[in-house]
Amino acid sequence: MQRAKPEAIVASWNAAAARIKGYDEAEILGAHFSRFYTQQDRQDGKPQQALRTVIEEGRFEGWLHDRLR
């Protein structure tokens, strides 16, 4: 859906991501990926957990993947 730079900055975006997440390319490119999380999730450290998963497993499949199973 989207790619992030190693610093967790959104580096690419497409029409499907825009439909699902509600951000257009101009407003999300260059933003930190934690923007996709709620304030509570950010306080709970979920973005950091996701980054650890990416580092340890090479990928992270978040809320959308879980809902499509």
Image: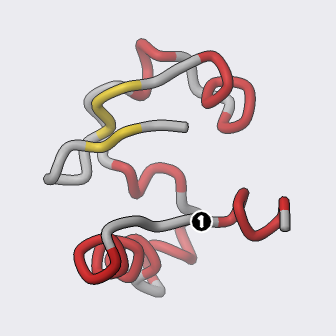
Task: Give SS at disc 1.
Answer: loop
| Mark 1 Cα-neighbour bin, 10 Å: few <14, some 14–19, many ≥20 | few
Judge from the rendering whether residue 41 lies leftward or rightward of residue 5; answer left or right. Answer: right
Q: Quadrant of the C terminus?
A: bottom right
Q: Residue at x 55, y 37 (%)?
A: 1
Question: Residue 60: x percent and y percent?
Answer: 46, 67
Question: Residue 34: x percent and y percent?
Answer: 40, 57
Question: Residue 21: x percent and y percent?
Answer: 66, 37
Give the number of callouts.
1
Q: Mark 1 highlights which residue?
A: 62
Q: Which residue is drawn at 40% across and 74% down?
A: 50
Q: Is residue 44 above or below residue 61?
A: below
Q: Which colour scheme is used?
A: secondary structure
Judge from the rendering whether residue 2 lies leftward or rightward of residue 15; answer left or right. Answer: left
Looking at the rendered structure, the kind of residue marked 1 is Gly
Camera-nearest residue between 56 and 35: 56
Question: Residue 54: x percent and y percent?
Answer: 32, 70
